[in-house]
Amino acid sequence: MWPLAIVLALATALCTACGGASAPGSTAPAAKPSGWDQLEAAAKAEGTVVIYGPPGTGYRQMLVTDFEQTHPGIKVDAIFVPPTERMSRVSLERQAGRYLADLWISGTTPSVTDAKDAHFTQPLKPQLMLPEVLDESLWFQHKLWWADAEEPDTVLMFVGSVLPIMYVNSKMVDPRQFSSYWDLLDPKWKGKIASTDVRNPGPGAAPARFMFKQPQLGPNFFTRLFGEMDVKLSQDQRQLVDWVSQGTYPIGLFMSQNEVDLAAKQGLPIATVPAEQFKEGATIGPANGAVAMLDRAPHPNAAKLYLNWLLSREGQIAWQRDIGDNSFRTDIPKDGVNPLVIPKVGVDYVNSGTEDFSRSFSPSTLSKPIDEGLKKASGP
């Protein structure tokens, strides 16, 4: 009979080796590393941390309330704006000689391209302090998911969700009938499709880039889709969800998974079409689950404390609970996460959140075929 300690160790190793498995358990904090008490004291002396985060339901609860409840005495000042507005805001602040933000929590574009090129961010590795954060065995595929192509590593993806592309009104459209994205060009769907305008950063941009680079789809797919199918465009995610769930446009593309999941939980007839269902393959990305630290952060100790909390087991459980994204941590339960966004073991996904992937697109790369399609649709 093996000792209990050995049995438990083997069980833990097997769970971790599977890559996508989760291990439920208590949320008790791990042992504090050397210097942690001093960091907490310095962070409380600063009293504030400033976060620039993404718009959307749940982010204020996660990024503000959850942290403040865990760390009383440190106030979170948060601004929730889209990526382009966030980049413009930081640029204008820097031009005025003002350094207001500590952390940038969002997707990887433009943080791993524009912000990095402008030297707005700093190396993130030296800020990681908790052993449970640095232990790569606790993360999917036993690694930290840096978005950077090479050091210095400035942007860390802590979310790794499968990025579905297509959503349907479950009372009007059978999702099982689709096996290729080319099925969307069936004439019966003309005038029945709504989409996020993926010419702009934000929801849907990463999976749209994946489709653009997919050899079986490419720019021709976008030109035909937007040129032939009378696709209704919007940036308003709640409006898109309403259109699909009410049947105004029973098919939705490139939408916010978080908003779709929230609507489904409220009983609205909207369903996600599994990404693995399509023969062209599937992609994973961070959604809004990536973090960078701004250089010359005004509250460096509070920012460091916040960063380590965010990436900790406790912080990632809170993220999954409030946002619904799948954390790359494999030592936390996945009970509340939509199974459709959890990467499947053995499936080869394209990571569309990397710097290399983002830099393969100029601002007009995806816009050009869409503009051509829309021009064709509007006629001479």
Image (cartoon, rainbow, N blue to C red):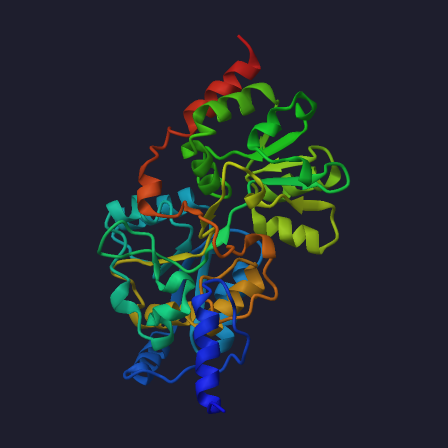
| Closest to the observer, 246 or 12 | 12
Residue 106: x %, y % from top left: 43, 53
Q: Residue furthest top?
A: 380
Q: Residue 184, relative to residue 145: is it above or below?
A: above
Q: Residue furthest right?
A: 171
| Residue at horizontal 38 percent and vertical 29 percent from the top | 365
Q: How many marks?
A: 0
Q: Is residue 46 left or right of residue 254?
A: left
Q: Quadrant of residue 136?
A: bottom left
Q: Is residue 69 visible?
A: yes
Q: Residue furthest front?
A: 1
Q: Is residue 21 left or right of residue 42?
A: right
| Residue at horizontal 36 percent and vertical 32 percent from the top | 363
Residue 345: x %, y % from top left: 49, 57
Q: Residue 195, relative to residue 113: is it above or below?
A: above
| Closest to the observer, 357 or 304 | 357
